[in-house]
Amino acid sequence: MTPLLAIDTSAAHCAAALLLGDRVAVRVEPMAKGQAERLMPLLEELLAAEGFGWRDLAAIGVGTGPGNFTGLRIGVSAARGLALGLGVPAIGVSGFEAAALGHPRPVTVALPAPRDHLWLQHLTETGAEPPRLAPAAQAGEVLHAPDAETLVRAIAQLACERAGTPQPRPAPLYVRPADAAPPRDPAPLLIE
C-alpha cells in the first residue's frame, strides 16, 4: 500500500488526508490565517501518526480552489514543491470537482465566496461550464460545498483516480482577479 497525500488550504482551514488503500486518515484544523506556518508540521504529524515518511508517498493531490487567494497559493506551492523534491506527481483537483464527487450530473456546485457571493460551476457528464461569481441570493438550486474533511477526502480520491495518467501541474483556480492592485507610483530607480 503506497499512500497518497492530499492537501487543501483553499478556505479558513488547513486540511490533509492520507489515502491508504480503502482507508483515509484525515487532519483538519480551522484557521483564518497561519496556513503557511502550520501546513508542513500538520503533514508531518499525519504521516508519522500513520507510520509513513515523505519518501513513502506515491502522489500528492491538492485542492486548487477557488477560494482564499493566499491559501490557494500556499497549498498549490507546497504540493508542487513536495512533488518535485520527492519525484512524485502533483495532481490538482478543483473544489467544484471535489464537492460534486458522488453526486449525479448534471449538477451546479456552489462554493463560498466573499461579500455574500458564491462561486458557481455547472458540471455535466462531459465537462464543465466556466466558473462564475454570483450573489448568494441568485444562486438557485445548487449543491453546496461540503465541510473541510469531506472536501479533502474527495480531493484524495479524485487525485488517486487521476494518478495513472499525465496531469498538468496544479495551479490555483481564480474565478476573478485578486483585490490587490499594483501601486500607481512608478518603481524607484535603482542605482548600481
Image (cartoon, helix red, strand yellow):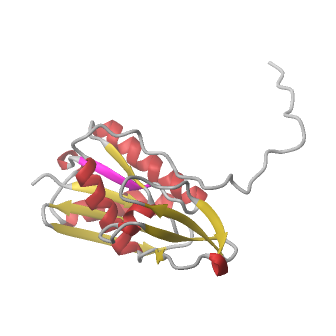
Residue nearest the observer in this picture, 41 or 123: 123
Helix, strand or loop: magenta stretch: strand
Q: Which residue lies furthest to the top in this view?
A: 192
Residue 152 x/y as whole percent: 35, 66
Q: In this view, does 86 lie to the left or right of 123?
A: left
Q: In this view, does 69 lie to the left or right of 162?
A: right
The answer to if 60 sits in the magenta stretch is yes
- Residue 95 falls in image quadrant: bottom left
Which residue is depicted at the point 80% across and 18% down? 192
Query: Would residue 183 be visible to someone looking at this image?
Result: yes
Residue nearest the observer in this picture, 45 or 139: 139
Residue 102 x/y as whole percent: 29, 70
**On the rendered image, what quadrant is the N terminus found in?**
bottom left
Write down the region rendered in magenta: 59-63
Q: Which residue lies furthest to the left in this view?
A: 1
Q: How many marks?
A: 0
Which residue is depicted at the point 46% across and 74% down? 145
The answer to whether residue 29 is above or below residue 164 is: below
Query: Would residue 13 be visible to someone looking at this image?
Result: no
